[in-house]
Amino acid sequence: MQLSQVKGIGLNSEKYLNELGIYTAEDLIEYYPFKYEILENTDHQTIKDGDKVVIGGICENKPNVFHFNRKLNKMSFRLNTGDFITNVTIFNRAFLKTKIDIGTVLTVVGKYDQKHNLITASNLKFGILTEPEITPVYHASFKINSSKIAKFIASALKTTKVKSLIPNYLSEKYHFISKEEAVKIVHHPNSKQELDKALTVLKYEEIFEFMFKIEHLKNLKQKEGGIQRNLDITKIDEFINNLPFKLTEDQLKATKEISEDMMSSYRMNRLLQGDVGSGKTIVAVISLYLNYLSGYQGALMAPTEILAQQHYNTITKLLPNLNIVLLTGKLKTKEKREAKELISSGKANIIIGTHALISEDVTYQNLGSVITDEQHRFGVNQRSNLRNKGKRPDILYMSATPIPRTYALTLYGDMDITSIKTMPKGRKPVKTYLKSGKQITEVLYMILDEIKKGHQIYIVAPLIEESDKIDLENVYKLEEKFTKAFGKICKIGLMHGKLSNEEKDQVMNDFKEGKTKILISTTVIEVGVDVPKATMIIIFDSYRFGLSALHQLRGRVGRNDLDSYCILISDRETKRLEVLTKTSDGFKISEEDFKLRGGGEIFGLRQSGDMNFKLADIKNDYNMLVKVKEDAEEFIKSKKYLEPENREITEKLCGHKELD
Ligand code: ADP
Ligand code: MG
């Protein structure tokens, strides 16, 4: 229905509403309040100076009005609340003078000034509040205010049909009130309980719409054409059987899912997520081998030189008969040219590198598979560049930041997700302790023990330089302290974000090779770098980090069968940090983080705007998100979405063309 058909909306109002993104009567009734003002009588016993108060009472005198000028006036009167008498003043309400007299019952909203026994009122209502009064507040503009919008909505509600996108059987399952009722309540609630019920329905609906679309997209994507491979799978099995270790169940499952994707005629677009050390690399290598066997080039992109080098070494050992080429920004011009030639001529079977891999002057001969390691470190642009190299190569993203499934679905909605949840056998959990700043001596002895065993230690601090505002341990101060303590028995490395990439690589390499035994660093220490002898990580001011970030850091150690330790030093937020002492399950930890700090905190994506719900909030409505996702998945999987009774909903959600 057009806006102009709504009673009371003229041409101007229509224009102003358009500016707010409202074009139809349906838009208007789904223009939900962004908050509610709740008026509730203040308890007289608790009133203190400066409080905001809502107080009912009887007017004791004829109001006094003073006109400062034509635009400014002040009205004053005394109000008897039953418990006490107070003065009230309110500005620019002179027009109410004739309506207020001795004995008039009023409710005033304002601020209480004890010294002058005065309420400076911002609002005034006739009568007494018998129950809380809830007023919706709408995002408004200069041209059209919130109460005007409320009026238009009330008018539109009388004549506009409200259609729900929630399938009937789900509404029944949760005993939802009808959407029509819910919408009316949301715009004009009589009680909090009623409002809660209504909000539940409307939030459910918008999340359902979102989740349906994602699930449906996934369904469609299965039809996106890709490389159809033809090969003898026994060679893969042989390769797996000859590995120095047995793959974990989850690694096998991941391998299976990835191979199926690659063998099928559609294009793979999959995220492989798993805790640090869960063994994603070998899964990637298997897929690269499969890709090679079917006659294509494969590329593996890592976020840093050192990680690319590490992968190069690993993969060269695992696939000695293949031509594997390393391409990073660090190569000399001549080496780069040679590498690029090997790539474009097709002599290179597998190419490993940093984002130099996707620079424009790299041409692939026959790129069939692309993998990015530590996916979250790459920007979206790099992701799409990668997608466009070659002819529809299969794509695998790997990430060691496990994210709650629902959140992954929104951030990576277009991807399928495989999770490795189990660790390789024999891996011992990192013993994690929470210590206060005072217990540092104890910690120093623990460090000494590890050094004596020939092990290595990471020390992490949140800041680089001394900050006069907040007293945080910083790497320079720590370097000084630790050099005093251990300088005589071992070498200490220093790493932070202000070093050049070459310097960072140098510091990291020295540590990897055991030249330095202690590495003091900010959080820039490489994700994914394997330093087998590193058995201890100490994190100062750990309260400054999210749990997931701490868990990532902890993943630097415990990469083999040695006992390893993580020591969190903090005098604050110890309750939150305790989670880490109790579990080493990255998925659990990130869910906890998610609940405590919100999704944005985990990824530093607060502004990402990936989910712009009108009413729902991904953090506060987390439980609902999970439930709705399951419902939407089931709605599609069971093919209920194609049944006649749901046809209308489905058409609205995805348009009928895609239906068939
Ligand atoms: P991440 O998932 O963090 O990238 P990696 O792939 O680097 O982990 O694996 C960590 C270490 O575990 C490597 O040294 C790797 O060789 C080893 N590893 C991987 N899978 C297994 C397994 N199934 N059994 C034993 N060790 C394994
Ligand atoms: Mg890795």
Image (cartoon, grey):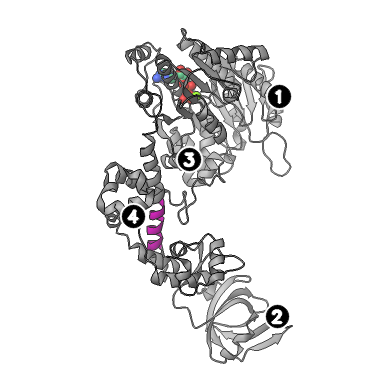
The answer, for residue 533, to whether it is visible in the render is no
**Disc 1: CA contacts within 10 A as few (<14), some (14-19) or many (>=20):** few
Mark earlier in primary sequence (1, 3): 3
Q: If the image is split into quadrants, where does the C terminus sit? A: top left
Q: Are marks 3 and 2 in contact (CB under 8 Å)?
A: no
Circle 1 SS class: helix
Give the residue type at disc 1. Answer: Lys
Read off the residue under disc 1: 484
Residue 294, compared with residue 98, is above or below; it is above
Q: CA distance from mark 1 to mark 3?
A: 46 Å
Query: Residues in magenta?
Result: 196-207
Read off the residue under disc 4: 166
Mark earlier in primary sequence (2, 1): 2
Residue 66 position in % (x across, y down): 70, 86
- Ligand 1 within 8 angstroms of badge 4 C-beta: no
Q: CA distance from mark 3 to mark 2?
A: 53 Å
Disc number lying in front (1 or 3): 3
Mark earlier in primary sequence (3, 2): 2
Give the residue type at disc 4. Answer: Ile
